[in-house]
Amino acid sequence: MKRFILTLSVLVIVFMLIMHNVTAQNEKLGIGLQYQAFTYGLSAKYNIDINSSVQATINPISANSLNMNFYGARYYYHFPQEDSPLKPYLFGGAGLITFSYKLSALSNGILKDYSDSFFGYSAGGGLAFKIVEKLEGSADIGYGKIDISNGIGVSSATLGVGLHYYIN
């Protein structure tokens, strides 16, 4: 499953790069970082038109015996403001968190592998703002839920921030 999600993410980014080269000059591809409710990672944002954009985020983490990965996608609907560096938006997103770690049994020191994956989704709104030419920041608030197991989930308000450099 991890390979499928990673392959899909790479294909989406390659598609965005190709589309960037064949679309109108005002459409932009942004590369940067995105933090969203306890996870952060590398991000690619593509402005489809003045009102719509998509984003793919990936976050591979490895520390000692823990390996965790986040793969996410978002759709943004922008409310463009003429002659304003501020751009309010609504978003909807989904993601997959996978992890594995080794547990050491207390009695005999045998290592055991444990792994699982969680699906989550979120929706909300925010504000994108131009910092300098080609550099955009964003801040948002929303509601998110992660399905842990057999209908059990965790939901909460989410906060997010992003920083993207746009390539023309």
Image: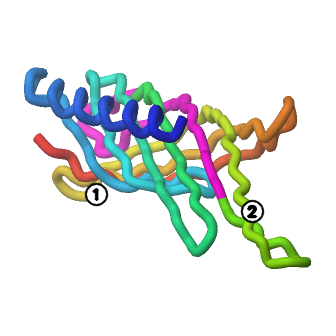
Q: Amino acid at mark 1?
A: Ile
Q: Is residue 167 left or right of residue 47?
A: left
Q: Which residue is mark 2?
A: 112
Element on which disc 2 rests: strand
Image quarter in which the N terminus is found: top right
Q: Say few, some or many: other residues with alpha carbon within 10 Å of mark 2 (under 14 / 14 to 19 / 20 or more).
A: few
Give the Cα separation between the discs numbered 2 and 1: 48 Å
Q: Which residue is mark 1?
A: 131
Element on which disc 1 rests: strand
Query: What residue is shown at x 58% (from left), y 56% (from top)?
Result: 68
Q: Which residues are magenta?
A: 79-100
Q: Is residue 159 left or right of residue 131?
A: right
Query: What residue is shown at x 32% (from left), y 30% (from top)?
Result: 12
Location of residue 23 by image quarter: top left
Query: What residue is shown at x 28% (from left), y 30% (from top)?
Result: 47
Q: Is residue 132 left or right of residue 64?
A: left
Residue 9, magenta (yes or no): no
